[in-house]
Image (cartoon, rainbow, N blue to C red):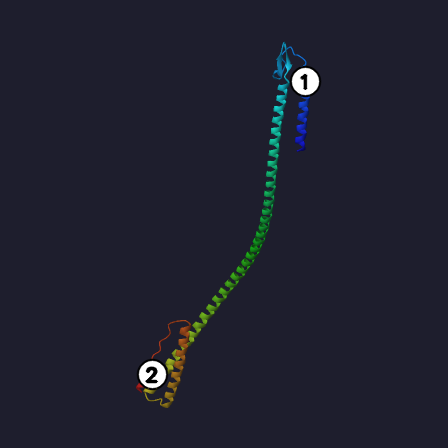
Amino acid sequence: MDHVSSLIQHLLKERDEAIARAKTAEKALVKQTPDGSEFYKRDGDGYRVDVEACLAYIAKRRESQHNTICQNVRARKSLETENASLREECRAKGETIAAMQGRVDWAYTLRDAAVASHEGQKRNTEAFMRERDEARAENASLKEALEDQRAWMREQVIALWEDTEKRYGDVADSDAEGKAGAHARGRIKEAESIKDAICECLRAFTALKPTSAPALTNTQENKEEGR
């Protein structure tokens, strides 16, 4: 506002000086039309300064400059309002950026924790896979040993079965011929108990792993019943 007041005072001073110069020049006649003839009027044989035209020009110029000043003032106020709005927007955006930066930092923290957790899970998975492979190898070895034990057990049972059948048949033949008597019947009972034990072993072995076991016959039992 001080600048506007100074400008108005300068215009008023310029007007007063122009009026003084016009009044001084009004007394002098100009024989030829001078530059700026719109400020002169015909007076006899020459021209005289038109004070009213000069004042009108000065007033018009002052009004134009005043309007320009008013426009500048309004523009400055508008700019100040816009600047205040921009400053507020920048402040809000600064707060938003700070909050976003905090979230970004938190996201980096979560990412680092996730990476560390992933690395730990990866190591645990690798350890588990090693243990799994070792367990598989151990299971394969145990299966092989079990198969060997099953084969050995089967051989032993079959041998025992064949031996019992042979002994059972020998006793039955002796009894059929009437040569063994009570001693033969004792051997028959012993053979039957052995046969039952063998049958129990075969049933347990079959439950462990179904295989084709030698069939049991009731030939000797039929002989005993017939006797």
In this view, 145 is above or below 37:
below
Pinpoint residue 138: horizontal percent, then vertical percent: 50, 66
Q: Nearer the viewer, residue 179 or 50?
A: 50
Residue 53 in which image quadrant: top right
Task: Please report contact status of discs 2 and 1: CB closer than 8 Å, yes or no.
Answer: no
Upstream in sequence: badge 2 or badge 1? 1
Residue at image position (61%, 36%) is 77
Pinpoint residue 63: horizontal percent, then vertical percent: 61, 26
Q: Amino acid at mark 2?
A: Glu
Does residue 160 appear anywhere in the picture?
no
Q: Is residue 5 left or right of residue 162?
A: right
Question: Rounded to the nearest whole Å, what is the CA distance between mark 2 and mark 1?
Answer: 168 Å
Label count reads 2
Residue 72 in which image quadrant: top right
- The quadrant the N terminus occupies is top right
Crowding at dot 1, Cα within 10 Å, few <14 / some 14-19 / many 20+, comes out as: some
Pinpoint residue 9: horizontal percent, then vertical percent: 68, 28
Disc 1 marks which residue? 23
Pinpoint residue 78: horizontal percent, then vertical percent: 59, 36
Disc 2 marks which residue? 221
Does residue 47 appear anywhere in the picture?
yes
Q: Amino acid at mark 1?
A: Lys
Residue at image position (67%, 30%) is 5
Residue extending farthest to the top is 45
Crowding at dot 2, Cα within 10 Å, few <14 / some 14-19 / many 20+, comes out as: few
